[in-house]
Amino acid sequence: MRHAAADPVALFSGHYVNVRAPRAGDLIAAQLRESGLVTVDGLHSRQDMLDLASQLMAITPHPHSAPDGLTLIRDTGSHAHRAGFAGLGSGDLQAHTERSGVPRPPRLMLLACLRPAPMGGDVLLADGRDVHARLVRSCREAAVTFAQPRTAYFGSGAGHATQVITAHADGRISIRLRQDGLARWSPIAQPYLPRLRSAITDSQHRITLQAGQGYLLDNHRWLHARTRFSGDRQLLRALGEPHFSLPEGFAPRPWAAPLATMARRCRT
Ligand SMILES: [Fe+2]
C-alpha cells in the first residue's frame, strides 16, 4: 500500500501537544480548530485516559464501551467476522469515520495505546481536507457526486442515509465514510469509489503508536485506518463532544470549492 507521507515520526511530532503543559487544553482546542488532529503521550492507564478525555469532551457511550464510556480495542477472537465488528479483530481496517451509521457521529475521538502489537497495528490517518483536495484535483465530478445527498447508506438496518462530503451553508465541509460490509452506495456514486480510495491512500500518514501514545482527532474531518497485527494489542478509545467551540466541518482549500459545476467525466 502506498502512502503520501509514511514517516511515522513526522505526523506524530508535527501534531504533538504536551498534555501536562500549562494551558494544554487551550492549545489542544486551537490545534483541533486549525488542523483537526493532536497527538499526545503519557496515557498509560484507564485513569489517564479518563482524566484527559473528561477534560476535553463530554464522553458519549458506544455500544461496546464500558460504563465509564471508554472502549477497549483489542482482538477479542470472536468478533472479527461479524459485520461492523472488525475493529475488535486483528485485520486491516480501511479508512473510516467512527460511528458513521448514526445521524450525528461523535465529533471527537481520543485513542491511546496501552500495549502495542509485536507486529503491525500501525495507525493510518488521512486529513479529509487533503482527501477532498486530491479528489477535486483528480476528478472534480467525483467530488461533486460524493456531495450529492443520500448517495451512501452506512450501517445496518438502523443505519443512516447520507453522503461522503457534506457541504455546509458557510462553505465548510464535513467528511463521513465507511468501506466495510455495512457501506452501500448509490449507482451514481459507486463508479467513483476507486477515485476516492486513491485520494485517501495518497493522503494517509502512518503512525506507529508506542505505549502511552495516542491521538485526538476531529471525527468529521480525519479518517482513521489500521493495518493488520498480531498479538495482544490494546488501545482505549473515548468518543465525545468537545467542551470548547469547534465550528462544524473545515474550510476546504480555496481552489477546491465551490463544487457546483461538473467537470469532464472521469469514472474509472
Ligand atoms: Fe474506528
Image (spheres, grey):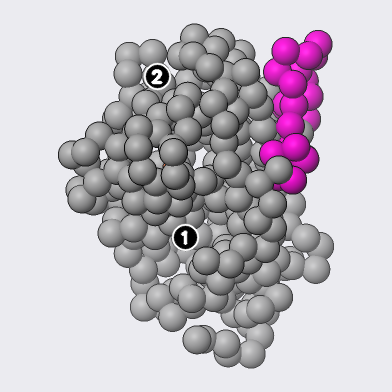
Q: Nearer the viewer, mark 2 or mark 1?
A: 2
> Residue at point 36% right, 43% down?
230
Q: Which mark is residue 84?
A: none
Q: Is residue 151 visible?
A: yes
Q: Quadrant location of residue 6?
A: bottom right
Instruction: Give the structural element (helix, strand or loop) at label 1.
Output: loop
Instruction: Give the structural element (helix, strand or loop) at label 2.
Output: loop
Q: Is residue 131 visible?
A: no
- Residue type of the residue flagged with mark 1: Gln
Ligand 1 has an atom within 8 Å of the beta carbon of the residue at disc 2: no
Which of these two is toward me, 213 or 262? 213
Magenta segment includes 38 = no
Q: Position of residue 162 (x, y in %)?
A: 42, 56
Q: Is residue 232 above or below residue 9?
A: above
Q: Position of residue 159 (x, y in %)?
A: 30, 49
Q: Quadrant location of residue 215?
A: top right
Q: Is residue 146 above or below residue 108?
A: below
> Residue at point 39% right, 60% down?
179
> Residue at point 48% right, 76% down?
194
Q: Position of residue 163 (x, y in %)?
A: 47, 60
Q: Residues within 10 Å of mark 2 (few under 14, many from 20)?
A: some
- Mark before the other along the chain sequence, 2 or 1: 2
> Residue at point 74% right, 52% down?
251
Q: Is residue 114 left or right of residue 198?
A: left
Q: Which residues are magenta?
A: 10-30
Magenta segment includes 14 = yes
- Residue type of the residue flagged with mark 2: Gly
Q: CA distance from mark 2 to mark 1?
A: 28 Å
> Label 1: which residue?
163
Q: Is residue 154 left or right of residue 263?
A: left
> Label 2: which residue?
69
